[in-house]
Image: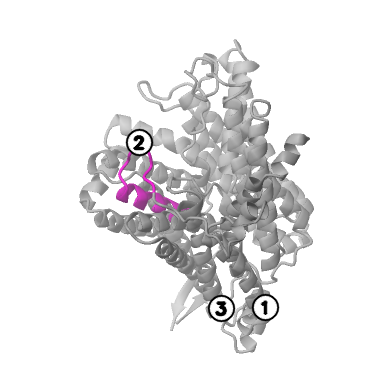
């Protein structure tokens, strides 16, 4: 048995790949639920109804999907140029703490229209800066950015923990390490009343469309793709590799920082060290499930968010640990990798 | 200044260096073995987490400590097999596959742990490895408590580094691993099966990673809790580069790194209240990044690292 490269990638297979991958992941998760002695079909049903069964659950799923779209785009944009930004989690936190600090200390008393746009920029810049360090190390010292971005996640979280337990600590939080609350005028408008859903969702979807446009219709889109496909020949073809990667890193880090920004301004209102349930890492899965397509990211983020929200509800009624959501999401990444492989290769005996 | 000298002169510091170094030595050797054959294994963080959980769980359910380590090794090997299927047979991106393995192994570890161990106020504990006394050396003044009060797995890890150095540079199997990592096509021309070598190296390396994780729960601590591996796996990946892919330097690198870590832990207590503790906790990660920057250009990278091998395809 051996693998043979397909001459054409069948379009139907490319579209079906994520669905097959998710189905396979859910099937394996079903086995794990069954092994735990719980009723599998009831567990699936609970996941589905907890994620989409009521107005509240739908808005919760969408609220959860909003930062995931942004971290997913952050990974998708970078991976397309073969910039392995695994630091989304750290960039998320740096963006979050930057806006919390700016809103509480600089913009106190400013109007919403004045401070919210500035806070978006501050959050994005914070994320950018954190990714430019590993990129600089790669361009200057040939250091693999996978490891440095991963290590910086820990540094970033410790830095946030230091600030929320120190200079930015909220004196009214009964001693808990949490940042001062952002200014009321800095909170994002709600999309629906009686829910946590905020305009961050609209913004994230709009950004997905904007990135889709940039990648498919601009010179920069072609360059970043060329940088990913083959850096050496890209340079020969006149692509300014360093500059392209810097812009890719600024977009990618900026998006992850923006994810932290909308989570603080839209949902929580302050920063704690458990602000993110792994949005940065889940963003990698979202990007891969979407096959790095910006519009696909929106759907993949919705699936991932539904898994997490659904598993929360399922856990309460069926008694299966919520970690089943993380397991399923990780499995769907692995099965997606395999599914994509089979869109490119076929088995020959 | 006196405080610094006091720290350096305390036997406790040097004992802590060896203790902190042990999981790093095992993890770094595992990652190194795999990379010498041409496969980067970023599954390490998850594999260490799974090893820590499954080894502990075995002992908690009545297995003895050595069986716990063996089970951790087997658990690691299973994930190593998974990574091999993805990266060797299918030739997928080693970066993404490895991250996938990490996400899967760690979330699966947490799932199994939550399922098997009910939630309680204080985490349940086991009776961990006890320090062993080699030929009465532990009663030597200073040197005894500093270097000879470790548990058995620490000595095993140090011996393993020497064995692996010999295996890689002096034996036919080591030559086959190195050739596969440098040029799998040339290796195949010599009658070596690069696929088999890579499978073997990744699986054996992952077993070592599993044992490295289990050292945390069976010797350094006595309980398991989520996120306890704390990026040690990523630090091991950095140490492989620092060691320029050589086991004897990996041993040195892990010890040097552990020295800084043990030192900052003691400095924390001296400077508590003056400098926030988080600054000290950042040091290991920043040191790893600095080590990478210093060594990345100088290190001798296996030439076929991260290049999938497909028969008849270049």
Alpha-carbon distance for marks 1 and 2? 54 Å
Farthest top residue? Answer: A109
Give the class, few, some or many, for how many residues have Cα within 10 Å of label 3's Cα (few <14, many ≥20): many
For mark 3, name the chain: B
Residue B304 locus on image (x, y percent)? 66, 72
Q: Is residue B295 above or below residue A343?
A: above
Disc 2 target residue: B121
Q: Nearer the viewer, mark 2 or mark 3?
A: 2
Please report contact status of discs 1 and 2: CB closer than 8 Å, yes or no: no
- Of callouts 1 and 3, the N-terminal one: 1
Can residue B62 be seen from the camera position used here? yes
Give the quarter of the image for residue A121.
top right
Residues tagged by mark 2 and mark 3 found on one chain of the structure: yes
From the viewer's perspective, is residue B146 above or below residue A306?
below
Q: Is residue A182 above or below residue B71?
A: above
Residue B183 numbered tag: 1
Residues at circles 2 and 3 in contact by the CB criterion of under 8 Å: no
Tell me the magenta residue range. Answer: B102-125
Label 1 vs label 3: CA separation? 12 Å
Ranked by sequence position, the earlier of labels 2 and 3 is 2
Callout in the foreground (1, 3)? 3
B260 on left or right of A34: right
Q: Earlier in the sequence, mark 1 or mark 2?
A: 2
Mark 1 crowdedness (10 Å alpha carbons): few <14, some 14-19, many ≥20: some
Q: Which residue is mark 3?
A: B197
Mark 1: secondary structure = loop
On screen, residue B207 versus residue B117, left or right, reads right
Q: Can residue A48 be seen from the camera position used here?
A: no
Q: On the same chain: label 1 and label 3?
A: yes
Graded by Cα atoms within 10 Å as few (under 14), some (14 to 19) or many (20 or more), the crowding at tag 2 reads few
């Amino acid at each position: 048995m051996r693998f043979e490269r397909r001459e054409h990638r069948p379009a139907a297979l490319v579209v079906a790949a994520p669905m097959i991958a998710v189905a396979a992941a859910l099937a394996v998760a079903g086995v794990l639920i069954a092994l735990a002695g719980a009723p599998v079909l009831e567990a699936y049903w609970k996941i589905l109804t907890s994620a989409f069964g009521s107005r509240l659950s739908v808005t919760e799923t969408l609220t959860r999907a909003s930062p995931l779209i942004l971290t997913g785009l952050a990974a998708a944009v970078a991976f397309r140029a073969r910039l392995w930004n695994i630091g989304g989690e750290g960039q998320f936190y740096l963006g979050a703490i930057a806006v919390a600090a700016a809103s509480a200390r600089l913009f106190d008393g400013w109007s919403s229209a004045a401070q919210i746009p500035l806070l978006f920029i501050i959050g994005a810049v914070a994320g950018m800066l954190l990714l430019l360090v590993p990129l600089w190390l790669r361009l200057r010292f040939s250091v693999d950015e996978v490891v440095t971005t991963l290590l910086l996640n820990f540094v970033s979280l410790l830095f946030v923990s230091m600030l929320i337990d120190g200079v930015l600590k909220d004196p009214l939080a009964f001693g808990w390490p949490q940042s001062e609350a952002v200014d009321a005028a800095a909170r994002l408008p709600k999309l629906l009343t009686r829910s946590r859903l905020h305009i961050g969702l609209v913004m994230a979807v709009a950004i997905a469309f904007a990135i889709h446009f940039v990648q498919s219709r601009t010179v920069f889109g072609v360059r970043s793709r060329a940088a990913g496909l083959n850096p050496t020949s890209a340079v020969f073809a006149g692509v300014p590799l360093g500059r392209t990667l810097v812009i890719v890193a600024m977009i990618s880090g900026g998006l992850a920082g923006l994810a932290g920004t909308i989570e603080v301004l839209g949902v929580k209102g302050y920063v704690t060290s458990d602000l993110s349930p792994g949005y940065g890492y889940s963003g990698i899965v979202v990007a891969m499930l979407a096959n790095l397509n910006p519009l696909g990211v929106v759907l993949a983020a919705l699936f991932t968010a539904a898994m997490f929200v659904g598993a929360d509800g399922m856990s309460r009624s069926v008694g299966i640990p919520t970690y089943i959501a993380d397991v399923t999401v990780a499995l769907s990444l692995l099965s997606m990798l395999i599914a994509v492989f089979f869109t490119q290769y076929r088995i020959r005996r | 200044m006196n405080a610094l000298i006091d720290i350096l002169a305390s036997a406790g510091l040097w004992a802590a260096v060896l203790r902190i170094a042990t999981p790093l030595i095992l993890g770094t050797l595992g990652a190194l073995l795999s990379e010498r054959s041409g496969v980067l294994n970023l599954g390490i963080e998850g594999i260490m987490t799974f090893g820590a959980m499954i080894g502990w769980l075995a002992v908690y359910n009545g297995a003895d400590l050595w069986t716990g380590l063996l089970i951790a090794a087997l658990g690691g090997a299973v994930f190593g097999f998974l990574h091999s299927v993805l990266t060797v047979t299918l030739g997928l991106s080693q970066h993404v596959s490895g991250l996938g393995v990490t996400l899967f192994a760690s979330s699966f570890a947490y799932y199994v742990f939550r399922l098997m161990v009910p939630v309680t106020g204080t985490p349940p504990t086991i009776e961990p490895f006890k320090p062993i006394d080699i030929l009465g050396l532990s009663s030597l003044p200073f040197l005894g408590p500093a270097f000879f009060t470790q548990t058995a797995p620490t000595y095993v890890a140090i011996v393993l580094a020497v064995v692996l150095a010999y295996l890689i540079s002096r034996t036919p199997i080591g030559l086959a691993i190195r050739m596969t990592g440098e040029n799998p096509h040339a290796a195949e021309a010599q009658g070596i099966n690069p696929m088999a070598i890579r499978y073997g190296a990744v699986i054996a390396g992952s077993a070592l990673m599993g044992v490295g994780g289990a050292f945390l729960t069976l010797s350094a601590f006595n309980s398991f809790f989520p996120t306890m591996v704390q990026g040690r796996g990523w630090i091991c990946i950095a140490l492989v580069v620092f060691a320029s892919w050589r086991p004897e330097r990996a041993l040195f690198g892990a010890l040097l790194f552990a020295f800084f870590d043990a030192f900052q832990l003691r400095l924390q207590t001296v400077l508590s209240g003056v400098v926030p503790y988080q600054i000290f906790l950042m040091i290991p990660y920043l040191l790893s990044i600095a080590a990478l920057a210093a060594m990345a250009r100088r290190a001798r990278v296996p030439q076929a690292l991260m290049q999938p091998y497909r028969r008849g395809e270049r």
